Amino acid sequence: MSRPEPSPARPDERGAAGSLAGRDPRVPAQQLVAELVPPPRFAGVRFSSYVPAPDQPTQAEAVAAMSAFGESVLAGERGRGGGLAGLFKRRSAPQGPPGVYLDGGFGVGKTHLLSSLYHQVVTEGGRTAAYGTFVEYTNLVGALGFRQAVEALSPHDLVCIDEFELDDPGDTVLMSRLMRELVDAGARLAATSNTLPGALGEGRFAAQDFQREIQALAGQFAVQRVDGEDYRHRGLPAAPAPVDDAAVERAAARPGATLDDFADVLAHLARVHPSRYGAMVRDTAAVCLRGVSTVGDQMVGLRLVVLADRLYDRDVPVVASGVPFDEVFTEELLQGGYRKKYLRAVSRLSALARDGAALVG
């Protein structure tokens, strides 16, 4: 499954092409399906390029477990043939749980391993797979409708779900039902998260009211723990110091860079569906932000988390003035039910800011 050539983001009447807040891309629903592949940052990774820490045995164990799972996918009946009958032919049932689930902290290489599994099955094994974040799959269902989403995903031998997180009861029921139908069609599942599957939803809604759905999700996976430090911060400060506005504007002079006030970007994110954030930052050389400030509103914060994920996926450096990124969310948000999402965003934005610091010397 190859990523289609993107069309450049077009400015709308709210701004110029060099402004992130001036981009309002339109993404056809079928393009959302075609783009379910590992992001550019992980296009070249393989199990062989993952270097387990010697003092963290679970990392080497995770490599072995994911590679073995990939071999089991490749060894299964392909379940494809001509016409609709072949398209929905049931594959042979796997031995044990139909999925594998990587549980671990930030920056231990879970996305690297999940992308390596995809490449083992697709690039090297010639099978088909879909790869996306949890948010991208829920957006896909919203764009296509549930039945069409099932039909689009069911023919794949493997469905990879990165950053698995349940934020509300509706998502719990939706993903439980989606994965149940995919497994019934013979697809195998692989997921990553910072939360064990049986504990998904804790702290965000009345998880006890949805235990049947949550346990149904947990029953789909064999869990593999991955321990270790966040590789983005090993031996590095948590976040680089912000630069001044003049330095931000100098960095924005680079071809393909954008220049915005942070407040304008936050306001614009509210007008653009999160499924289009990836298209919004596509082909961007750097994102330059003036006046980064601390965010205390939950909805604004969660939209910023999605933007941070899409920037990180695409290796887009960030140059910013204002507060450092380890202060971009209030303590209340960092201690709340979405804590792990915010901490992931801080980790990723800090890494991108370090890349941005190189642009300003």
Image (spheres, rainbow, N blue to C red):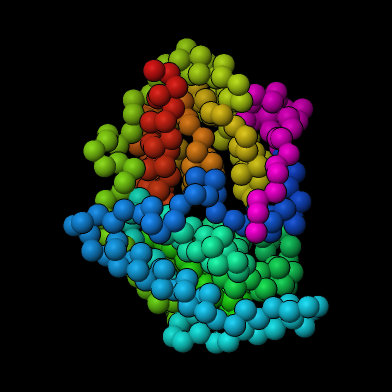
Q: Residue at x 48, y 57 (%)?
A: 115
Residue 6 image-quadrant placement:
top right
Looking at the image, residue 274 sits to the left or right of residue 56; the answer is right
Tell me which residue sits at (45%, 82%) in the image.
97
Quarter of the image where one finds residue 16: top right
State the extent of the magenta-drawn residues as a range: 1-24
Residue at image position (70%, 49%) is 4
Establish if 124 lies above or below 216: above
User: Number of numbered discs present?
Assistant: 0
- Can you name the residue that lies furthest to the left here? 55
Q: Main secondary structure of the magenta part?
A: loop
For the residue pair 163 and 108, the one nearer the viewer reads as 108
Rendered image quadrant of residue 20: top right
Image side of residue 156 versus residue 61, left or right:
right
Residue 326 in percent (x, y) is at 35, 37
Above or below, comparing residue 334 to residue 81 in the picture: above
* Residue 208 in view in this figure: no
Does the stretch in magenta take in 280?
Answer: no
Viewport quadrant of the N terminus: bottom right
Q: Position of residue 243 (x, y in %)?
A: 40, 19
Q: Nearer the viewer, residue 26 or 92?
A: 92
Q: Who's the residue at 65% across and 51% down the image?
A: 3
Is there any visible trace of residue 230 in the rendered image? yes
Furthest-right residue in this view: 83
